[in-house]
Image (spheres, rainbow, N blue to C red):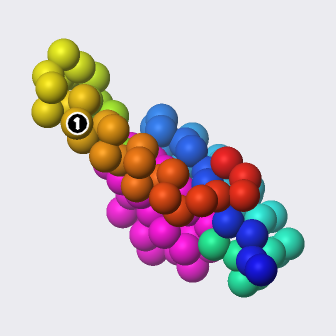
Amino acid sequence: MSQRALVVRFTAIGDCVMAAWAATAIRERHPDGFLCWAVESRCAPMLDRTSLVSRVEEIPRQRWKRNRWSPKTWGEQVAKYASLRRLRFDVG
């Protein structure tokens, strides 16, 4: 059974680049593993171009912060977190 890992790095693009060593280390240790990276919307295109990550989950954190009291935002957050939980990660 392959390992399933979730990397959560919501902040700036530079932080995602600096944290990429973790993806490299995980991929070297588990070449057939499933590696998902949850990032802010602006970082997602950068990670989509790398073969280190199996899946990129885009989190619209800035929009959610602007509309934090909106029931629509709450619904989106619950749906996103539920979809991540359904992936049943071993490490996250």
**Can residue 55 be seen in the rendering of this structure?**
yes
Which residue position is annotated with label 1? 75
x 31%, y 37%: residue:
77
Answer above or below: position of 84 versus 25: above
The quarter holding residue 25 reads: bottom right
Tell which residue pokes out farthest to the bottom in this image: 32
Answer above or below: position of 72 versus 18: above
Q: From the viewer's perspective, is 22 left or right of 38?
A: right
- Quarter of the figure that contains the N terminus: bottom right
* Mark 1 residue element: helix
Question: Amino acid type of disc 1?
Answer: Gly
Q: From the viewer's perspective, is 63 left or right of 55?
A: left
Residue 52 drawn in magenta: yes
Q: Nearer the viewer, residue 45 or 60?
A: 60
x 77%, y 65%: residue:
26
**Rendered location of residue 18, percent (x, y):** 65, 47
Answer above or below: position of 25 versus 77: below
Q: From the viewer's perspective, is 25 left or right of 81?
A: right
**Rendered location of residue 46, percent (x, y):** 43, 62
**Rendered location of residue 34, percent (x, y):** 63, 72
The quarter holding residue 28 reads: bottom right
x 41%, y 48%: residue:
82
Q: Residues within 10 Å of mark 1 (few under 14, many from 20)?
A: few
Tell which residue pokes out farthest to the right in this image: 29
Q: Nearer the viewer, residue 12 or 62?
A: 62
Q: From the viewer's perspective, is 73 left or right of 4?
A: left
**Can residue 63 be seen in the rendering of this structure?**
no
Residue 56 drawn in magenta: yes
Tell which residue pokes out farthest to the top in this image: 69
Magenta stretch in the rendered image: 35-58
